[in-house]
């Protein structure tokens, strides 16, 4: 059985007060027993998250990292810095970062740096509307998966999580239907099966792209969807909690 994972990507939103509110709300929360929940606030709030999430089911995650261990990289943050503040998971390859110029090679290096620091890389893959309309969804997402998974040592591959986020559904209110999401994520699972059957059976796949309380249960019921990477809905504690409850 794959442990469900719900991760909230706050992007450039939030506040110290909101971090504390989430910690208080989840402190006495009764969640499905095997569920993992990660909140990914902006970097300045990681210290507050470390304090507020202590003793709750919440873990702190980060939205990106620089693959270098240190150096003259103004505005950047390394994997070891994230680990020092209790971060457990970090996004790599989010489409909003890829649109700013991050390449598959950079995403691979970020994943390696995260693994070296004992962080869980959440590899984001997804197609644009143009690529979808051209029938290239499968080609695009499998290329992005292969760029990171193929060069990794087999023992390190199993520590990743893959999040399928169709770019056309991020922040638009549009959502892939459960069948569309399952088809894309089933293709990823099939690619993993060809690589290694044990890896395919154990590696978690998340759906992202306007998942919310109203559609979470139906999406999470699909066989190859093991959780969600939540955007806007993760900023509302009641909505986020309801999504977590749907993962039981």
Image: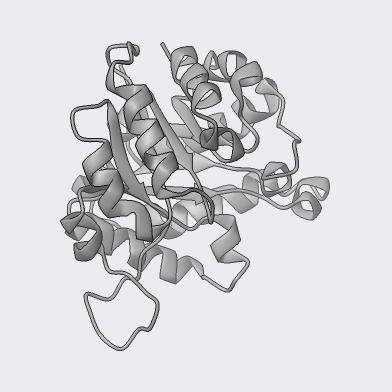
| Percent x, y of residue 188 | 51, 38
Taking depth in this image into account, of 155 and 102 the one nearest to the observer is 102
Residue most toward the front? Answer: 17
Quick check: 46 left or right of 54?
Answer: right
| Percent x, y of residue 32 | 34, 11
Q: Residue at left 65%, top 17%?
A: 214
- Quadrant for the N terminus, please: top left
Q: Residue at left 33%, top 58%?
A: 111
Look at the image and tell me whether residue 133 can be seen: yes
| Percent x, y of residue 117 | 18, 58
Image position of 1 with respect to 24: above or below: above
| Percent x, y of residue 72 | 31, 89
Image position of 239 with respect to 117: above or below: above
Look at the image and tell me whether residue 150 can be seen: no
- Quadrant for the C terminus, please: top left
Q: Residue at left 27%, top 58%?
A: 114
Taking depth in this image into account, of 230 and 227 the one nearest to the observer is 230
Residue 60, by quadrant, is top left
Taking depth in this image into account, of 128 and 64 the one nearest to the observer is 64
Quick check: 19 left or right of 231?
Answer: left
Image position of 206 with respect to 76: above or below: above
Q: Colour scheme used in the picture?
A: one colour
Residue most toward the bottom? Answer: 72
Residue 35, by quadrant, is top left
Q: Residue at left 43%, top 56%?
A: 42
Quick check: 170 left or right of 188?
Answer: right
The number of numbered discs placed on residues in the rendered structure image is 0
Image position of 73 with respect to 180: above or below: below
């Amino acid at each position: 059985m794959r442990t469900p994972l719900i991760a909230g990507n706050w992007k450039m939103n939030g506040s110290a007060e909101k971090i504390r509110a989430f910690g208080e709300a989840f402190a006495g929360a009764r969640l499905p027993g095997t569920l993992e929940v990660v909140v990914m606030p902006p970097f300045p709030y990681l210290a507050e998250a470390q304090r507020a999430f202590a003793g709750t089911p919440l873990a702190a995650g980060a939205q990106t990292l620089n693959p270098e261990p240190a150096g003259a990289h103004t505005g950047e943050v390394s994997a070891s810095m994230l680990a020092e503040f209790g971060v457990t998971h970090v996004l790599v390859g989010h489409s909003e970062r890829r649109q700013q110029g991050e390449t598959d090679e950079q995403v691979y290096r970020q994943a390696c740096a995260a693994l070296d620091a004992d962080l869980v890389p959440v590899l984001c893959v997804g197609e644009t509307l143009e690529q979808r309309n051209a029938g290239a969804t499968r080609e695009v997402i499998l290329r992005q998966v292969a760029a990171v998974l193929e060069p990794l040592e087999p023992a390190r591959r199993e520590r990743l999580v893959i999040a399928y986020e169709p770019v056309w559904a991020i922040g638009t209110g549009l959502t892939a239907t459960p069948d569309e999401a399952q088809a894309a994520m089933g293709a990823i699972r099939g690619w993993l099966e060809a690589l290694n059957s044990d890896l395919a059976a154990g590696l978690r796949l998340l759906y992202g792209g306007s998942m919310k309380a109203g559609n979470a249960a139906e999406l999470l019921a699909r066989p190859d969807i093991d959780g969600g990477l939540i955007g806007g809905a993760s900023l509302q504690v009641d909505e986020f909690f309801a999504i977590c409850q749907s993962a039981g």
